[in-house]
Amino acid sequence: MAQEDISVQGPHLGGVEAVRQLFSRLPVHVAVIGIVIVWSIPTIALLVSSFRDPGAVITSGWWNALRDPLDLTLENYNTVLSQRGMARSFANSLIISIPATLLVILIAAFAAYAFAWMEFPARNALFLITVALLVVPLQMTLIPVLRLYTNLTVETELPVLGGRMFGTSSYPGIWLAHAAYGLPFAVYLLRNFFGSLPRDLFESAYLDGASDRLVFFRIVLPLSMPAIAALTIFQFLWVWNDLLIALILLGDPDLAPMTLTITNLVSSFGTAYQLLTAAAFISMALPLVVFFALQRYFVQGILAGAVKG
Amino acid sequence: MASVRLERVTKRFGAASAVDDISLEVPDKEFLVLVGPSGCGKSTLLRMLAGLERVSEGRIYIGDRLVNEVPAKDRDIAMVFQSYALYPHMSVYENLAFGLSLRKMSKSEIRDRVSAVAGILEIADLLDRKPRALSGGQRQRVALGRAIVREPAAFLMDEPLSNLDAKLRVQMRAELIRLHERLKTTFIYVTHDQVEAMTMGNRIAVLNSGVLQQLDTPQNLYRNPANLFVAGFIGSPSMNFFDGEIVQSDGHPACRVDDLVLGVDPAREAALGTHLGAQVVFGIRPEHSSDERPAGSAEQNAVRSKIDVVEHLGNEMLVYFLPVGHSEKLTFIARMSGERQARPGDELDIYFDAARAHVFDRETGRAIA
């Protein structure tokens, strides 16, 4: 924390020097631009196709649409959102993803603080076990979790929760499942970040009269925003893009997230590409927004720990 | 405002003791410096006082209160860390106000106290800045301010100046002394730098390997070191030591080093006399070795020596001597006036001032005379 802000200013470059530098960097620029193009084309194709007429999608390639932009239509989005229950599943995806993300961040942050800074018996052993859970394949747990959920199913009249309080086909059930699957990595990431904060800061705060709770909320959390933001993106994308857990634990189509609904679109309307592309783009849109909004933190968070801040 | 008392305090990490059976009392308003080489236990001692480290054995009192089991936040003590430990996400104002707001002080009272302290430390125009936008010296002041603003019973400082450059360190040293005068509170200051210790402390506790070596005023530490460690640690360059033996010479006890008999102050001869034949270490400071014969000094304290290396410091110079016609044991450093001429290879008679000489028991290291 005692670092000086160092601004590096190169010496003033002459014209020749500038050109030489440009050429020495050219291969890197070309390679980066090339990779960006190759990686973006499928997404652009998806986007363009989702605005095309069903007939055109079948008869010609997506790039033909670029010649005549006025031919594009919003009809596909209209169809998908209104008639295929996509709007409902978009909302379902949010209802599933947001609490599942918040739950992980909250629990992991508390746990990571304890693992990093509080003294208690078997601290390292418990941390090791938590991290070791990273190697357990998710698929191995599906049957036991499903059986457990079937036994623990609790019905409720509350319409918000989709009919069930817990167990299969319930929101709290899938929140908890996602939280459990996300926690080992989240605890690991945050513990390492918290652990790299200077000890003096904590001791200084204790001497200033702060309790562990205050140190956590007023010192650790504000200083850990990069790591927490990165984790939020990871976890949100993971839950948002999840199909497997939703497929297993959510039988009720009214609760189905985007991923599940799109899969059903594929099986029942296998040739309606224009609808699939529109649906896929709707499901991509939110993660893109989240990523661009938090990307500054994302990069910092990934570097966190590598360079002590 | 409070005195601090340690009774037989020990701190063990596993089998090793970092602090070993230390008892000392710091009266109210004293500036006590804990000094010693790295790993001597001085920081551990301070951290135990602060409540950041548990005491293995012994008792710590702040005022009349036994604080062994009192958590750090309830000890009414402030600490300045070597790294400053400013909260990086808070402005200077928030850094200073943090401890006060936790004590449920009113907003206006906090504002008054912060601006008073900012005035004392001349950081009033920095209150809106974040720590990263401050220079090292400014951060140092903010760290001090954060301690002062709480008006604690005692200040603990853990090498607070060691991250500053040399010039700023000298300046801050004087400011800390002034601050102590002004606040009239107990200061306990840890450093490994004996110059800081000598210039700032009312009293100095010299520690080595977790053991308290000597607790005394700066003058007494310099004049009457209790043992070899203190003698070597206080003073720069450190005292010259020669292995020798106590002998009787012309009816007076003296110290024989190799073929040379070195006399001591007549007032100390009696103490030497009780250790005839003992294996000892003869100590003489570089500033008490000179080519001018000290008044009243015995002639035999002269050593024929050749200059090996000269280090010019401007007003003075440090001269490394090799003995001529004596054994290598008598290699030593002398501090001489920078005005005079001295070249490597020159041969001189150097006198060790008997009145300032020290003799230590070689086995126990304790001072004999």
Image (spheres, coloured by chain):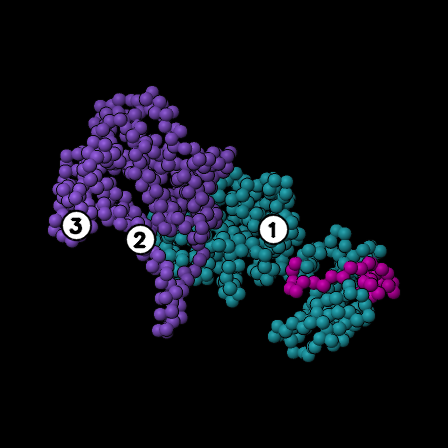
- 1 and 2 marks on the same chain: no
Foreground mark, 3 or 2, reads 3
Which chain is disc 3 placed on?
Answer: A
Given residues A143 and A302, the one toward you in this image is A143
Which residue was labeled with disc 1?
B39
Image spot of residue B166 (x, y percent): 53, 65
Residue A215, horizontal then vertical, whole percent: 41, 44
Q: Which residue is mark 3?
A: A65
Q: Amino acid at mark 2?
A: Val
Q: Mark 1: which amino acid?
A: Gly
Residue at position x 78%, y 57% in the image: B280
Mark pair 3, 2: CA separation:
22 Å
Question: Is residue B250 rendered magenta in the image?
Answer: yes
Q: Return the mark for residue A36.
A: 2
Q: Nearer the viewer, residue A248 or A263?
A: A263
Colour chosen for chain A: purple
x, y percentage for residue A244? 32, 32
Q: Outermost residue, top direction?
A: A151
Going by the numbered disc 3, the residue's amino acid type is Ala
Which comes sooner in the sequence, label 3 or label 2?
2
Q: How many marks?
A: 3
Q: Residue at x 26, y 50 (%)?
A: A41
Q: Residue at x 65, y 78 (%)?
A: B339
Where is the N terminus of chain A found, in terms of image quarters? Answer: bottom left
Mark nearest the camera among 1 and 2 is: 2
Q: Start and end of the magenta stretch?
A: B233-262
Question: What kind of element bears circle 2?
Answer: helix
Chain hosting mark 2: A
- In the image, what residue occupies the spot 48% across and 47% down? A199
